[in-house]
Amino acid sequence: MRFRLGYVAMTMNLEDCSPSSTVTFNSYCKLPDEEARLYRLRKLTKKNLENTLRILRYNNAMNIKVYRLTSKLVPLATHPATQGWDYICEFKDEFKRIGDYVKENGFRISAHPDHYTLINSSSEKVMEDSLRDLEYHVKMYEAMGLDDYKYKLVMHIGGMYKDKQTSVKRFKDSFEKLPDRIRKRLVLENDDKSYSALDVLEICEELKTPMVIDIHHHKCINSGGNFADLLSRIFGTWENEYFNPKVHFSSPKSDKEFRSHSDYIDVNDFTNFLDNVKVLGKDFDIMLEVKAKDSALLHLSKELSNAPSLKRINEGEFEIFM
DNA sequence: TCGTGTCAAGATCTT
DNA sequence: AAGATCTTGACACGA
């Protein structure tokens, strides 16, 4: 039984390699004319796409095959001010190059629209903005040539709006109304305040959509019940998917700031978790959501290389012995 | 060059 | 009803 490790968006170990450089709307407006504004957007986008490819090459060298793209690849992409700008067409070669590299080297790529993207909002405007944001993510996947649905977008359920039942219903309704090219990309995740792992699981089972469990969030709102059973059902939602189930993992910053993410993964915390998963006997991937990004991954990987009943295949992949 | 307040975006808690 | 807070990496401005 094997698992792989992945990390989010940026590397600590490459110089000047941000994939999410941007411009604030304010300073964008202050630029003298349309030409200067477009120039700025293009320059940033080009740099971000180049840096994404650099990061992927680095990941490949480090045997890290699980990676989350930043959602900020294209500055102000979904802002009303840039709506006429066809960045997909302009950068089609760059997007394609990234997608080719992903496919050639067998990466598991994902993305995570941020928490402003909510499809259960009661506000028409928020819904519109959210759809535009989902569309933006999907368009990039498609431009990369990653157009089968195995490359996913992770989302939360959204707000509670003082009425959980109605809010869940609204989520399901708008989920089912989404076009295939968006809906079939979606993976749903439990959050740390509103929708517990069990809440999300029930939604996922009904909608026949895979679920990612965030272990840290699950500790923030634990809906009770047997963890192995819960996990087994969650892994079951991946049955018809190309990739194995994935979980998100991070360690709390401290007991006081429990919800905040720490810089590094606590290795004991991690091996405790592994003990709970290994009864399932199924391969899976783990996305590490910590501040120190790939440094934390490599650090954890090193620590795990001494752990009993684990064998390190390479930096990003382990075998668990029962 | 460095430190700090601010940033496109929503929801929810606090006042 | 308005304002603060959450969270995040990076911008932007002023010292």
Image: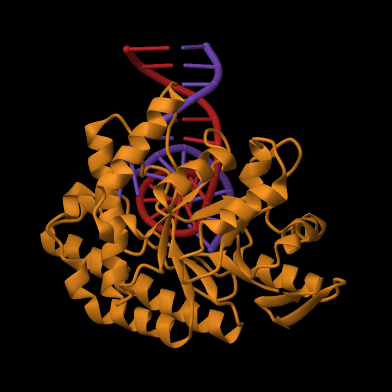
Chain colours: A orange, B purple, C red
Residue at 65% x, 68% y is A282
Image quarter (top left, top right, bottom left or bottom right) of the C terminus of chain A: bottom right
> Image point 19% across, 48% down: which residue?
A80
- Nearer-the-camera pick, A203 or A309: A203
Residue drawn at (53%, 45%) of the image: A201
* Horizontal side of residue A239 vs A290, given as left or right: left
Q: Image height check: is A49 above or below A138? A: below
Quick check: can you spot residue A270? yes
Q: Position of residue A306 (x, y in %)?
A: 85, 75
Q: Is residue A146 above or below residue A35?
A: below
Q: Where is residue A96 shown, x and y percent of the image?
A: 29, 80
Q: Whole-percent x and y of residue A12? A: 59, 69
Q: Is residue A4 rendered to the left or right of residue A104?
A: right
Task: Tell me: residue A301, above or below residue C4.
Answer: below
Where is residue A153, by image quadrant? bottom left
User: Taking the image as drawn, is residue A75 in sight?
Assistant: no
Residue A86, quarter of the rendered image: bottom left
Taking the spot 30% from the left edge, 29% from the top edge, the residue there is A122
What quarter of the picture does the N terminus of chain A occupy? bottom right
Q: Please give the count of numbered marks on the rendered protein.
A: 0
- Answer above or below: position of A266 versus A159: below
Q: Nearer the viewer, residue A42 or A73?
A: A73
